[in-house]
Image: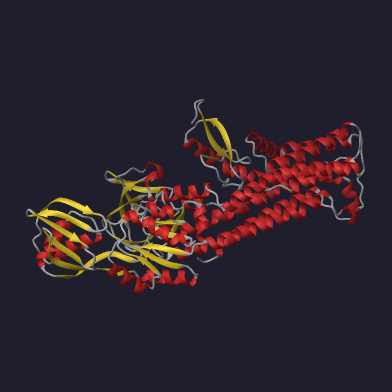
Amino acid sequence: MNDSGHTSTYACPMHPEVISDKPGMCPECGMSLIPQKHEARSRKSETQTHDKHAGHKTSSFLTKFWVTLVLTLPILAYSDIFTIATGIELPRFGGVEFVILALGSAVFFYGGWIFISSAYRELRARLPGMMTLIALAITAAYAFSVFQVLRGAEETLFWELSTLIAIMLLGHWIEIRAVQGAKGALRELAKLLPDTAEVIRGETSSVIALSELREGDIVIVKPGGKIPADGKVAEGESDVNEAIITGESKPVGKHEGSEVIAGSINGDGALNIEVTKIGEHTFLAGVMRLVAEAEASKSRLQMLSDRAAFYLTVVAVGAGGLTFVLWLFAQAGIVFATERLVAVLVIACPHALGLAVPLVASISTTMAARSGFLVKRRLALEAARNIDIVLFDKTGTLTEGKFSVTRASSDEALALAAAVDSKSEHPIALAIVEEAKKRGLAVSHAENFQRIPGVGAEARVSGKKVFVGHRGGADIVVEVDGETVGSISVADTVRRDAKEALDSLREMGVKVAMITGDSEDVAREVSRELGIDEYFARVLPHEKVEKVKVLQKGGAKVAMVGDGVNDAPALTQADLGIAIGAGTNVAIESAGIILIKNDPRDIPKIIRLSKLTYSKMLQNLFWATGYNVVALPLAAGILYAWGIILEPALAAVLMSFSTVIVAVNAVLLRRRVL
């Protein structure tokens, strides 16, 4: 908010009730949101306004079309085109021209005013576009026709004007339906939540609105019901389908103490769930924030198409004016010249060009979320198609990350190691402590614990300095006051799905590398088992970024897969950063794409989606620009000498048709399997 008490937001020129705090596309019609300045108001009131009017605004285009069509019929009946087409000339009466003027004015102000008001909003935002061109076209036709009637001339453009407005109203309604079918990642995510929840408060249960839920509430989720908020199971057992949230098709067993995610679907059992997170703190809300960021961000192709759409608007106005002047000089008459002007302005409307890329991007964002990963920045998804090598952080991605002790040289060494590691949360440390418990060993208290990044840890146990960690070999050594007293072997199992993921990447021509803080022996064994092309062992967290640079030196495009915490610099340095969004931690700033679950099989999906998305974007851009290249000269009358002319009404049909084709082509992306 600025000093004057105003806040900058973005609104649709056609649906001004659609308001967002980020740039993007209108969820109703797909037009680009334009910056607005208005008195600050709460997000809640904005949402209520949108919910109240969005459906009415969309359906009103069809209503306006039918009313306009009824008004247009008598105008057409008394037009020259009707007489030429049917050979019937209706009887004329005194003042018929003023009746036609009245009907044409009704069409212009009732049916056409929405385009004029939308153009005003575009011009006020200094972003002239589709609505500006339509408004110029119908205003020129109407003003010319009124002038002709007032000066007593018979030749007007009322039938062209009325049919043009009717067709544009119908066309825009069809476009909206097509766009709504193609768009709506956020809307689809919002549908995952139920409208109400059954909550136990006191001794009774009641059904309340989702907005009334509070943390600590106990909600009842019946078989087949949607889980209304993040929480943990307080009572009951059931299998829960989390596929829509995590992309995992297999139902997940839930029992007392298990965590559940809002929007997932309960199986056959009944669950009582304690609500732990509500509203913007839920996992789904975090996903929706990331999707919103992705929809507000732009790819290079979209920025190109946006500039092209703006320049097309400028060219259309110039070309329309030039067409008008040239036909006047050719002595074709002012009526014909005005018709050409109107046709050029209508045919050049850049809606198809403006939608060509954003619609595909929106659908790909939805497909990504359904496939188990989130696109945080569209530039990241665009970069994925050019990746040459994927660098995996080993633990938890290629391996289970759940270590177990396979050998200990003595119980004494294991007990000492467990004493030190009882202060650590490292997976290897947890495995050592767990093994000591299994063996029933007495574990002493440790003091002055100190973690040594990438090496191990040390502490004082019974007054002695004990070190537990790597000293260059595969095993973990245990030292007391600098003297080695034993060693421990641990194993981290390779994930079965990792082999499948790496095979898929190699089939796509993408190399695979691995980075780990483990020893050379461990790294070599994992690499051999998975067939990894290159690996980096004993790499400290702050050294990971240097390994990414090593891979990039040869000109390779590198994708880095890490946990987003100590891997943040490497994720940022990589051409594509892919973070593992473990648990509910989905807001990882350093990555462009986030895996909802740490399944390496999602990496090939990212690259496939990137290639499919780019291909669809190019197809849409080719159609949208090709249509304008061909249609604009036709509208100007370049083939008039051969009897080929493009009437304004037909120009409107082609303009709407091109937009629908772009939307339908974008929807076809959904049928592709990742």
Q: Is residue 610 above or below residue 120?
A: below
In the rendering, at what x and y percent does residue 137 appear?
76, 41
Q: Is residue 123 left or right of residue 43?
A: right
Residue visible at 72% across and 51% down in the picture: 655
Q: Is residue 130 above or below residue 422?
A: above
Q: Is residue 126 above or below residue 205?
A: above
Residue 73 seen anywhere in this rendered image of the structure: yes
Quarter occupied by residue 618: bottom right
Residue visible at 18% across and 67% down in the picture: 488
Which is nearer the eye, 668 or 220? 668
Which is nearer the eye, 383 or 433? 383
Q: Is residue 118 above or below residue 258?
A: above
Which is nearer the eye, 453 or 435? 453
Q: Is residue 280 left or right of residue 36?
A: left
In the rendering, at what x and y percent does residue 450 appear?
19, 51
Q: Is residue 352 left or right of residue 83?
A: left
Q: How is the image coloured?
A: secondary structure
Quarter occupied by residue 660: bottom right
